[in-house]
């Protein structure tokens, strides 16, 4: 796999793992933008949301369920954001699909992290 997240999935780069099964890995963001900032990543190398295929539906649905579970586990179930940046213009830096689960602070009612 060609990205930082690929190396984390392969186990050649460390991470602070918070969830793993055969299809999904979740870990703490190394530069958290909120008190809770987790990344939920499919092990399949999908570049970005715009490149998902119909066959990816089940793992995408499972990523949402993992987000829900982690929100409860990290005590942010009463309010959080689930974000995916798509493409360079969308702010995506790591070209391996991931959901940011961010919470533990109060967000204003617009888009973005702040
Ligand atoms: P994005 O801009 O949506 O591609 O987000 C990439 C995220 O990955 C950023 O929030 C980074 O802080 C995070 N990140 C980069 N390298 C690592 C790493 N080695 N471990 C954990 N998070 C990372």
Image (cartoon, rainbow, N blue to C red):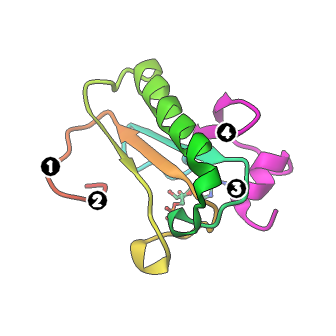
Tell me where residue 37 sits by quadrant.
top left
Residue drawn 76% across and 49% down? 8
Callout 3 crowding tier (Cα within 10 Å): few <14, some 14–19, many ≥20: many
Q: CA distance from mark 4 to mark 1?
A: 30 Å
Q: CA distance from mark 2 to mark 4?
A: 24 Å
Quadrant of the rendering where the N terminus is positioned: bottom right
> Disc 3 on helix, strand or loop?
helix
Closer to us: 99 or 7: 99
Earlier-in-chain disc, 1 versus 3: 3
Q: Label 2, on which residue?
A: 112
Residue furthest out toward the bottom: 89
Earlier-in-chain disc, 4 versus 1: 4
The verdict on label 3 being within 8 Å of ligand 1 is yes
The residue segment tinted magenta is: 1-27
Q: Label 4, on which residue?
A: 24
> Disc 2 on helix, strand or loop?
loop
Callout 2 crowding tier (Cα within 10 Å): few <14, some 14–19, many ≥20: few
> Disc 1 on helix, strand or loop?
loop
Q: CA distance from mark 2 to mark 1?
A: 9 Å
Residue furthest out toward the front: 54
Residue drawn 60% across and 61% down? 53
Q: Label 3, on which residue?
A: 5
The circle drawn on residue 108 is 1
Q: CA distance from mark 1 to mark 3?
A: 30 Å
Q: Is residue 13 magenta?
A: yes
> Disc 4 on helix, strand or loop?
strand
Residue 45 in percent (x, y) is at 72, 59
């Amino acid at each position: 796999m060609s990205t930082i997240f690929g190396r984390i999935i392969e186990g050649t780069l460390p991470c602070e793992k918070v969830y793993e099964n055969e299809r999904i890995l979740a870990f703490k963001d190394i530069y958290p933008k909120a008190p809770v900032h987790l990344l939920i990543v499919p092990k399949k190398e999908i570049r970005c949301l715009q490149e998902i295929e119909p066959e990816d539906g089940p793992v995408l649905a499972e990523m949402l369920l993992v987000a829900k579970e982690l929100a409860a586990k990290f005590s942010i179930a009463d309010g959080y954001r689930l974000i995916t940046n798509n493409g360079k213009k969308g702010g995506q830096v790591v070209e391996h699909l991931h959901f940011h689960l961010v919470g533990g602070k109060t967000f204003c009612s617009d888009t973005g992290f702040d």
